[in-house]
């Protein structure tokens, strides 16, 4: 999914100096962003004062939207570099096309994982014949320097492993949880899990104390470490936890996101992650003036032009805590 913000700002993210090294309960409120004509997303990352959670650097939550008789999601071809995109649905379908020639329809609780590496472009759209509801999350994972120039590739996993306990089921999206691992390729110690709680459930998820974590609410109401988290909001939890208490009075859906704090400082702008402003400027030129990011074939429409870069230079980021 693209960042469609036409006023996209350069931002510096990452670095262990900005990580909360102890358990906290920091409720993040979203910023509402239009994505095409009929889809509005709630952007949780990057957030004011909180730019990353492990290697997770971008989180959008959308829906549930009634798109019967509507075009639904329509994101024209656009570029990515230096990151992985994670497409995750609870309802609906998303048709993925990319410059490698991939053509896949992603359905609920299937993993669409695109590793941009040095350069890729793709489009995302609701199929012409689609179900009534569209509900999901789109996430980005920053690639570490050693792997950010890998050859681009796309993975589609339709059968993901689960971890279950009375009243709770966790589907592994990326990384590992409680000894169970996702088949999706990860380049840093990380976890992403989709958690379903039934009404009345109480559970305790095992966590890694060296990871930082957050929980995104997808549906229903759940208490996360005693804090009510409503759909479209995200609770940042910091580090230093060995377990996470969960409780639900109704059926609820959550996403657990975590990982080792990302040591490197990165520069993020629009749909690019690099290490300097000059690198970002070069990537923009590559999209607008050359064939660096390839061509998405089969999409009915024009590709997305890059916004103008801000005229100011980057400044060092202040510490969050």
Image (tube, rainbow, N blue to C red):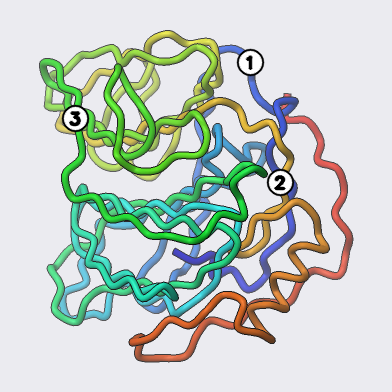
Q: Which quadrant holds the N terminus?
A: bottom left
Q: Residue 266 carries which label?
A: 2
- Which residue: 19% across, 82% down? 128
Q: Distance between the residues labelled 1 and 3?
A: 29 Å
Say which residue label 3 marks.
Answer: 162
Camera-side residue of 116 and 177: 116
Q: Crowding at label 3, few (<14), some or many (≥20) Cα neighbours within 10 Å?
A: some
Q: Earlier in the sequence, mark 1 or mark 3?
A: 1
Q: Distance between the residues labelled 2 and 1?
A: 20 Å
- Mark 1 residue element: loop
Residue extending furthest toward the front: 151
Say which residue label 1 marks.
Answer: 21
Displayed quadrant of residue 73: bottom left
Q: How far apart are marks 3 and 2 (CA)?
A: 32 Å
- Mark 2 residue element: strand
Judge whether 113 appears above or below 29 on screen.
below
Displayed quadrant of residue 129: bottom left
Q: Crowding at label 2, few (<14), some or many (≥20) Cα neighbours within 10 Å?
A: many
- Mark 3 residue element: strand
Judge whether 318 appears above or below 298 on screen.
above
Q: Do the residues labelled 3 and 2 touch (CB within 8 Å)?
A: no
Q: Which of marks 3 and 2 is nearer the N terminus?
A: 3
Give left or right: position of 220 versus 97.
left
How far across and down, in percent of the image, does residue 104 sit?
25, 68
- Which residue: 49% across, 72% down? 121
- Indicate which label's residue lies in the foreground, 1 or 3: 3
Numbered disc total: 3
How far across and down, in percent of the image, does residue 311 sit?
86, 70
- Indicate which label's residue lies in the foreground, 2 or 1: 2
Give left or right: position of 82 versus 281.
left
How far across and down, in percent of the image, does residue 302 sit?
47, 90
């Amino acid at each position: 999914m693209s960042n469609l913000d036409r006023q996209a700002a350069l931002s510096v993210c990452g670095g262990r100096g900005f990580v909360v090294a102890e358990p906290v309960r920091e409720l993040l409120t979203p910023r509402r962003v239009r994505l095409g004509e009929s889809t509005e997303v709630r952007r949780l990352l990057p957030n004011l004062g909180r730019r990353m959670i492990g290697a997770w650097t971008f989180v959008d939550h959308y829906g549930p939207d009634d798109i019967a008789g509507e075009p639904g999601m329509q994101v024209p071809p656009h570029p990515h570099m230096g990151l992985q995109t994670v497409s995750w649905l609870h309802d609906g379908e998303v048709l993925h096309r990319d410059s490698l020639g991939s053509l896949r329809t992603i359905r609920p609780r299937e993993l669409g994982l695109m590793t941009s590496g040095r350069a890729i472009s793709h489009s995302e759209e609701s199929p012409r014949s689609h179900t009534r509801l569209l509900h999901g999350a789109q996430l980005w994972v920053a690639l570490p320097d050693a792997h950010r120039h890998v050859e681009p590739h796309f993975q589609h996993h339709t059968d993901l492993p689960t971890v279950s306990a009375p009243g709770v089921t966790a589907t592994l999206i990326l990384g590992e949880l409680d000894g169970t691992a996702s088949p999706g390729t990860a380049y840093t110690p990380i976890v992403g899990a989709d958690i379903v709680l039934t009404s009345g459930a109480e559970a305790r998820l095992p966590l890694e104390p060296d990871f930082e974590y957050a929980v995104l609410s997808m549906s229903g109401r759940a208490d996360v470490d005693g804090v009510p988290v409503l759909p479209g909001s995200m609770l940042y939890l910091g580090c230093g936890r060995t377990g996470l208490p969960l409780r639900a009075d109704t059926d609820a859906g959550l996403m657990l996101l975590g990982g080792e704090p990302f040591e490197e400082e990165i520069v993020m702008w629009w749909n690019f992650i690099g290490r300097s402003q000059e690198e970002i400027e070069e990537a923009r030129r590559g999209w607008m003036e050359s064939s660096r990011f390839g061509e998405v074939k089969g999409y009915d429409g024009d590709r997305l032009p890059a916004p103008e870069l801000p005229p100011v230079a980057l400044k060092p980021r202040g510490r969050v805590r």
